[in-house]
Amino acid sequence: MSLPSIAPPATIGILGGGQLGRMLAIAARSMGYRIAVMDPDPDCPTAALADRQVVAGYDDVGGALRLAASSDVVTYELEHVAVAIVDALEGVVPVRPGRLPLLVTQDRIAERRFVEEAGATVAPWREVRTTDDLRQAAGELGLPLRVKATTGGYDGRSQIRVGAAADIDGALERLGRPPGDLLLAEAEMAFDLEVSIIVARGVDGRSAAYPLARNTHDAGILAESVAPAPVPAEAAERAADLGERLAVAMGMVGTLTAELFLMPDGQLVVNELAPRVHNSGHWTIEGAATSQFEQHIRAICALPLGSTAALAPTAMVNLLGTGRRRVARMEVGEIGAALADAAVHLHLYDKRGVFERRKMGHLTAVGSSVEDALARARAAAVHVCWADDTVDVGKEGQG
Ligand code: ATP
Ligand code: MG
């Protein structure tokens, strides 16, 4: 039985109003949909794109019910949304993806169990609560280890590296979680490359994988992606199969991203899943026949999926903030230089404040090869900077 399509001008409710919500909203609006967004920050990046905003936190059931009242379908742009919200919306409005993707991906230990049950590989791991547990995990798994908070982490926050036995004492304190908190300790993997596979799955169970992206991180935060990843076709096919298998196991409707380590022996190790569009898929806006954002909207609205074919070798470079927390204003003198190369495209998220390492936007470039595209995007990124003479701003959205 196929579910009815949700046709424009229906309203899509988005839980979370960061840059992912903003780019989902741009894609949805261009298809004629209306947007409602729920975010605690009235000036969040999606606000300007939304017909309606509910100002509420990601655990505010009352706020979510208000969002649902004006939405024909609800989706989320981050996995840190309270499961209680999905429960409260059941029978009120379809939430796509639903409950299981949230349960699996908001808890790193649940995520590892899910991946293992789906027959895929994760880094060897242990649950730890105390320094003694960590010492035992180090004995069993070896060093280096990565110790990660089970919930709430992103952009490499809430995790630490334990490189040597001498680092074990005090390691849990460095992570800064309450004593006795359940944590994940896992072996640090000596991968060849980091890659990610993005798969969209429709309500009819059909799925489509994008070409694999190769990702480079800087201290835990995504810095660059290129696609199609320069890896053997056989590895890319295995990654696509893996992504589809995980999407089926999760009962996914919408877009699923699997961050993977490609090991020297060709094995693919799952690092993290995101039941949503992903930073490593931003290249699809210019580089693929259908952007990941449009694809997600198609999937949750029970429409046929678009082609995921790459149009050209494409690179994406994140534009991270620098310096103290202040009002974000680009140095105008430099913006023209950034776009002097006609192959380069600018995406800024209109975040009101800038601070060190905040994701402010990204650049994409298409090229004759991914390395050519990457060189162009990098050359452009050098010119993007934020004015230093603006006033300090208070604490606002963290992402
Ligand atoms: P993001 O939000 O950017 O995905 P995150 O906070 O969810 O980050 P992870 O994805 O777990 O954190 O880790 C961030 C990066 O740290 C990884 O992409 C990888 O570069 C490195 N990393 C994490 N775990 C391991 C590991 N077990 N072995 C090797 N590198 C790792
Ligand atoms: Mg990650």
Image: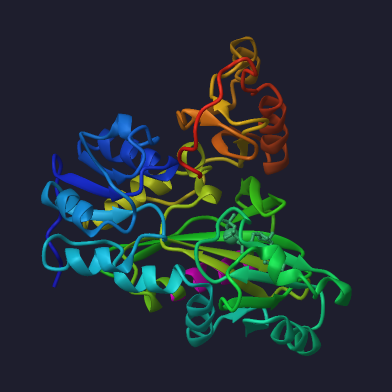
Give the quadrant of ligand 2.
bottom right
Query: How is colour applied across the structure in the image?
Result: rainbow
- For the point 59% across and 26% down, the residue is 343
| Residue 130 image point, x, y percent | 67, 82
Q: Is residue 325 left or right of residue 193?
A: left
Q: Percent position (x, y) of residue 290?
A: 40, 45
Q: Residue at x 78, y 83 (%)?
A: 138
Which picture quadrant has residue 333?
top right
Image vertical order of residue 202 relative to residue 226, above or below: below
Residue 191 % position (x, y): 75, 67
Residue at figure coordinates x 59%, y 31% from the top left: 325
Left or right, 81 with reference to 267: left
Q: Nearer the viewer, residue 194 or 95?
A: 95
Q: In this picture, is 118 found above or below 371?
A: below
Q: Is residue 236 magenta?
A: yes
* Res 325 seen here: yes
Q: Which residues are magenta?
A: 235-245
* Among the 4 quarters of the image, the one containing residue 81: bottom left
Number of numbered discs on residues: 0
Measured as percent of width and height from the top left, residue 352 is found at 46, 28
